[in-house]
Image (spheres, rainbow, N blue to C red):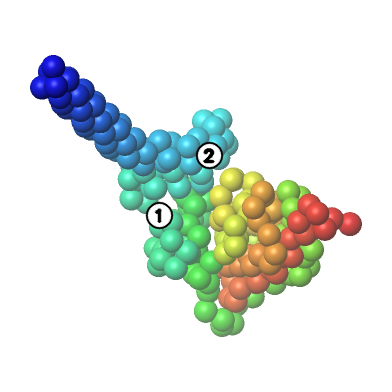
Amino acid sequence: MLSLSRWRWGSVLVLAVLALLVSFVAVQLSAADERKSAPANNESRRALPLESQAISGTNKQAVSAIELAQGRSDVGRLGVMQKTREFDAAAYARDPSAYLDIAEPGRVWDVAEPKEGVVSLEPISPVIVEMNQLATTRLEVVTAPSAPVTFTSFDLGKFSNGLTTITVQANGKGSAAAEFIASEGTVENVNVLAGSPSASGQVLFSIQIIPPDLRR
């Protein structure tokens, strides 16, 4: 009677251990599957807002950034400190869109050497700005007529293309503007640098973001 009871308890113990092992293996396999799929899912979630804008065909700079980030293009550089291709004024004159449709934050460093006949980049709008979070402000500079100007934020926020950098074309008088949005999560001081390959110098905008609880 005693040996039978011991045998039963022994069997129960073995079954319990086996159940724990099976459960552990299942959990490990499930976690491995999640880790394997996580990068693709995260990348997809990051790309979706820009993809939705790009589908309309009006946000080619966002398309270029997405394709470059996903390895589907080798045109352009995403790093703000990465050296960009040298500006080709003749190629730009023939086809401005080939340059304007690409988003490259590092273009703010590609500016003209100061010399006779080269204009200097100058601000039109105030360079010190105070704005509420989620609000929009217009940043404007003057360069050579029809020249490209790149605005790059070093501290979050976004421009009308959904990115932290945007390249715009100046009008016939050299005025170039970009709409900066203090998107959710953008706080305190934001530095936005503007540069143009057709003008010497750069313009630094210092933007102070007022959080919702301190709005006036």
The answer to the question of whether label 1 and label 2 lie on touching residues, with beta carbons closer than 8 A, is: no
Q: Closest to the observer: 110 or 115?
A: 110
**SS class, disc 2:** helix
Determine the image quadrant of residue 214.
bottom right
Sequence order check, earlier mark of 1 and 2: 2
The answer to whether residue 1 of the structure is visible from this angle is yes
**SS class, disc 1:** loop
Q: Amino acid at mark 1?
A: Gly
Q: Is residue 107 left or right of 175 when viewed as pictured? A: left
- Tell me if residue 76 comes above or below residue 43 in the rendering: below
Q: Farthest residue in the front direction? A: 1
- Write the residue at 66% across / 56% down: 186
The answer to whether residue 15 of the structure is visible from this angle is no
Labels 1, 2: front one: 2
- Residue carrying label 2: 50
Determine the image quadrant of residue 187.
bottom right
Q: Residues within 10 Å of mark 2 (few under 14, many from 20)?
A: some
Q: Residues within 10 Å of mark 1 (few under 14, many from 20)?
A: many
The circle drawn on residue 76 is 1
Cα separation between marks 1 and 2: 17 Å
Q: Amino acid at mark 2?
A: Leu
Q: Closest to the observer: 38 or 153?
A: 38
- Write the residue at 65% across / 61% down: 145
Q: Closest to the observer: 11 or 178?
A: 11
- Write the residue at 51% across / 44% down: 62
Residue 122 place in picture, x, y as percent: 70, 72
Residue 179 place in picture, x, y as percent: 70, 52
Q: Closest to the observer: 158 or 141?
A: 158
- Write the residue at 76% across / 50% down: 135
